[in-house]
Image: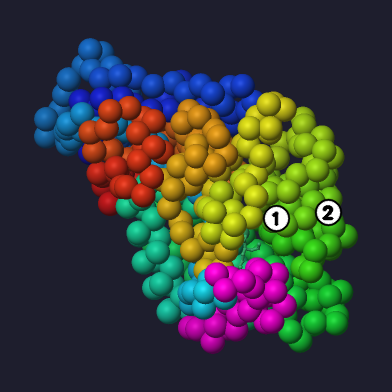
Amino acid sequence: MKTVIKNISELIQTETTPRKWVAGKDMSNISTIKDAFVEVENGIITSFGSMDEWNGIEDWNNTDIIDAEGGMVFPTYCDSHTHLVFAASREGEFVDRINGLSYAEIAQRGGGILNSAEKLQNASEDELYEDALNRLNELVQMGTGAIEIKSGYGLTMDAELKMLKVIKRLKENTDVTIKATFLGAHALPKEYKDNKDGYMDLVINEMLPKVADEKLADYVDIFCEEGYFTVEDTKRLLTAANKYGIPSKTHVNQFNAIGGVKASVDLGALSVDHLEEMADEDYTALQNANCMPTILPSCSFFLGIPYGPAVKMMEKGLPVALATDYNPGSTPSGNMNFVASLGCIQLKMTPEQVINATTINTAYAMGVEKELGSICIGKKANLFITKPIPSYAYLPYSFGHNVIDKVMINGKFQ
Ligand code: NIG
Ligand code: FE
């Protein structure tokens, strides 16, 4: 069955040859086609162009025609950093922060990641799956067509495997493109309070081999931060993961720049994420690397911490990706439209830069740039149709509103 979407006022982020990523000055450009059509067959984009070039319908019995009625078509967002699987919200900590406690103080009192871990350890796989599926369906309606999901609220062998199995079920039962990341080194469990090396041994020598053996993770991750895991821990984990052929995506520079960027880049990380605090050597490490710097502006918004220096990165010729960080503690939102708005409003990126940062560059950051991230013949038909809007800048401009009308994943409207 073919689907043709016609009368698209503007088709956004078209590509003739798939690119690896978009970096530096190039981030200011996107290709678009006004008054356009897109043709989709078997879940894949087979043709696109201006309405003048459209050949019309060859087989009426085998073609669905969708009239975009003046809406625009964008490739769906790729959200390359989330913690979508969790057992409970943490609005109590949100209120504690309003009343003056910091994120670090809450964590020291046993809140934060350990609070989520306790709840998750007591939840069943089925409950976690149902909740995560509901969240995912909500995100799809907001334009997300690919998502990376981390473990890291288990912190025991059983609970980490339980999380990764939930992610595997989401992969198997939805059309969304999903990548799983093993984040056993997210926080030190209470039982290992004075024995960090013991916990790292458990993560590296017991959890990682099992995760690799059961093929439950596409990537590994570690929270490299003061009070969590060190640069040495990061090197140890990434070296071990590389031996299993599992690349990494790391949490670095959220509160302090302690050298996690260089350690990650040196060990071949696909992305380094957060980057609210950047030292000169972090930029140097990223030059000429194959690692995607990924900023998570909704986390900065929610915690009131600095925003990552997107403009400076682009001035230095680097690519920039923007993802949500959806999790119950630091970012209880998986809305990529809001990320796009924050990219413009707080990071001072242009709408074109934000579109590149949330599609093609996040596709790279989750290893799917050959199949997603743009409107390109041969890529997956993951796209959304907007309500009629005056220009593509209207999308990040109209923050808090939903301008998305229909979402197609693998050629199917959701
Ligand atoms: O990316 N920084 C580490 N991990 C998450 C927050 C986890 C939590 O607070 O539950 C993040 O912000
Ligand atoms: Fe995160």
The x, y position of residue 294, in whole percent, is 63, 44
Image mark for residue 119:
none
Q: Main secondary structure of the magenta part?
A: helix
Element carrying mark 2: loop
Where in the figure is residue 317, as x and y percent of width and height? 69, 26
> What residue did someone put label 1 on?
254
Whether residue 363 is visible, yes or no, is no
Name the amino acid, label 2: Ile
Relative to 191, is 349 on the left or the right? left
Q: Which image quadrant for residue 380?
A: top left
Q: Which residue occupies 76% across, 71% down?
A: 203
Specify whether tag 2 is near ligand 1 (CB below 8 Å). Answer: no
- Residue at 81 percent of width and 71 percent of height: 200
Q: Are marks 2 and 1 in contact (CB under 8 Å)?
A: no
Q: Quadrant of ligand 1?
A: bottom right
Please determine whether, in this image, residue 165 is positioned above or below residue 391.
below
Left or right: where does residue 193 sit relative to residue 361? right
Q: Which residues are magenta?
A: 97-124
Q: Is residue 86 left or right of residue 114?
A: left
Indicate the quadrant containing the N terminus: top left, top right, bottom left or bottom right.
top left
Q: Badge 2 is on which residue?
A: 258
Given the image, on which type of amino acid does mark 1 rest?
Answer: Gln
Q: Residue furthest front?
A: 99
Q: Residue furthest left?
A: 61
Tell me if the residue at label 1 has its CB under 8 Å from ligand 1. Answer: yes
* Residue 290 screen position, x and y as percent: 71, 36
